[in-house]
Image (cartoon, grey):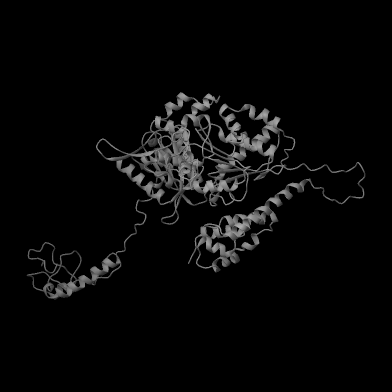
Amino acid sequence: MPYSIEVKDTAKRLYLRRCKPREIQAELKLANVRIVYYWIAKGGWDELLTDEEPLTAVSRRITLILEKPGTLGKVELDELDRLTTLRERLLKQCAKSPSAPQTLPVEPRARDGQNKRKPKQAKNDISELTELNFLEKFTSKLFGYQKQLFEAKQNPLTRRIRNVLKCRQSGLTYYFAGEAFMDAVLTGDNQMFLSASRAQSELFRGYIVGFAREWFGIELTGNPIILSNGAELRFMSTNSSTAQGPHGHVYIDEYFWIRDFNKLSSLAGAMATHKKWRKTFFSTPSAVSHQAYPFWTGDTFKRGKHKKASLPFPGEPELRQGMLCPDGQWRKIITIDDAIAGGCDLFDLEQLRLENSDEVFNQLYLCQFIDSTQSAFNLADLERCYSDLVLWTDFNPDPKADRPFGNAPVWIGYDPSRTRDDATCVVVAPPLVPGGKFRVLEKHSWRGHSFTYQAAQVKKLCERFNVQHIGIDVTGVGYGVFDLVRDFFPRATPIHYSLETKNTLVLKAQDTIQGRRIEWDADWSDIAAAFLTIKRGATNSGQITYSASRTDATGHADIAWAVMHALAQEPLNVNKKRRSRWSSLEGSHERSRTTDHSHAAQGKGVQLRRARVCADSPPGRIHGGVRQQRRPTLHPARIPHRLGQTATGQCPPRHHSALQTQPAAA
């Protein structure tokens, strides 16, 4: 059976990661292992393999064991324990190797005091940094609530697990990046950063590299970053196979927007098993239906059989001060009021209240969870749509790329603001096969620009992509954009909002999301948040409608409606197939032949009144390719049959006074 290019590329990636052909067959559920050997020989995959160092081979084997589905057996666990021990030993040897003296041949012309080579500087050398350096550059400039987090790290009773619920843009990613860098430099401990996507985890790396350059003039290189004291700083995404095996202090960012939290929690626990390691969870709130919600509220611990499970948990006032809970977690809530009280002067509180409804303001800035039971979309379904841009090998996410998606077709959805001069636009890759997956490749938000500027931006997208469809909401400023867009893209589709249109858009989006037929980068949490703000309601006349509250982050769910405008190109019923007319025409032909024979005697001598058709004309051909015999020779009633007239192909006058037809023959 033919296999798609995606299956072959996946098999190639697995083989280059040193998976065995039999393991590739089991992973991809191929019919036979011989097809894998055929792809290896035809594609020359063996030539792409490189020689491995011992450390690389051991790390690869650890990753392959941890990727096996299901629960690991005793044999795999024993092997994993041995490999982990061996890996730590090899890492220590690698850390010592740069400082080991090398025996170099001495040239005869070299003399004492002449031509002596300068010692090579160690890579990522931080040996001269002390706590005083960080006191001046980092800890002395923290806000009040950030200093509380630092104190909880220093306290042996609260340092093991820190769980922080924060408001938007409170600076915790910046703080925890600085805290981890300082800890790695002063103690030599490993630091692990887990995020929903690789791009989000790279945000930590950007902060740390910037700290070293701006504060101390040190250029950090490598990924992972390995400091001169042996400390590793790894930046991983939750859907990456490399997020397994290493150990150290773990930082998990935006865990309320990461799917499969139970799996994530187990992974973090494995990486920080030893008592010396810390686990830090911090995130903005999402919905009460998220898997992490019982973890935050302590319900997971209360359902257990621990002797402290019956102890009461502190309430919100205590958590805003920071409190050690019965389950051993130190929890803290940081609202926008707490941030302002702690010295953060980056917010305009009154303006934020004007831009957001009370419900949305409470969720974004007062750390209140969304009641997703009232939303038209389910958070669990939205989480299954998370992906990572690095996995899309056919797409170049560089915004400066001329043809980032090659010549593959894309659809564009545009949604304007109803009250302001801003808009949201998305680029969606449609599936190449019926029932395949959509992918949100790019998203753009234009604020403070006229419709002329926005139309020009849409034109630039048409120059970069092979655009096949543009869906534009023509309400308000959208009509101006549509009028300009159809000049260079006549196939642009105007979308006039009505109850029927809204219902169709939402039904299509629900079917696509519930069927896991769309993906976007997990770092784009604003897409899921926008869909969650769409709620089902009723008009004054009792008809069903959908609406969304305005937020500064999502608008009126602008990005969600933009995605739906792109999806509108595909019909609701994607499984409908065009029915063939062959069987119906063939059945009609057989029935007509039977009728002809049964009424042959009655129809004899009757001619149908049809232009340019005589009784002796040859059988014609009807649409559909089925040849059908005409009825036997017919002639007009009450008119004597004259052979010469029919033989010469002549027809009686259309208005002949004596011409009649017999209904029985017809």
Residue 107 vs 639, above or below: the answer is above
Tell which of 72 and 347 is nearer to you: 72
Quadrant containing the C terminus in the rendered view: bottom left
Image side of residue 261 versus residue 229, left or right: left
Q: Is residue 632 visible?
A: no
Image side of residue 357 versus residue 95, left or right: left
The x and y percentages for residue 41 are 60, 66
The x and y percentages for residue 663 are 11, 66
Residue 327 vs 87, above or below: the answer is above
Tell which of 407 and 395 is nearer to you: 395
Image side of residue 495 versus residue 662, left or right: right
The x and y percentages for residue 214 are 67, 32
Image side of residue 486 versus residue 104, left or right: left
Residue 293 vs 575, above or below: the answer is above
Identity of the residue drawn at 65% across and 34% down: 211
Tell which of 204 and 13 is nearer to you: 204
Identity of the residue drawn at 56% across and 62% down: 23
Identity of the residue drawn at 15% across and 74% down: 598
Total labels: the figure holds: 0
The x and y percentages for residue 317 are 47, 29
Q: Image quarter for residue 594?
A: bottom left
Q: Is residue 376 visible?
A: yes
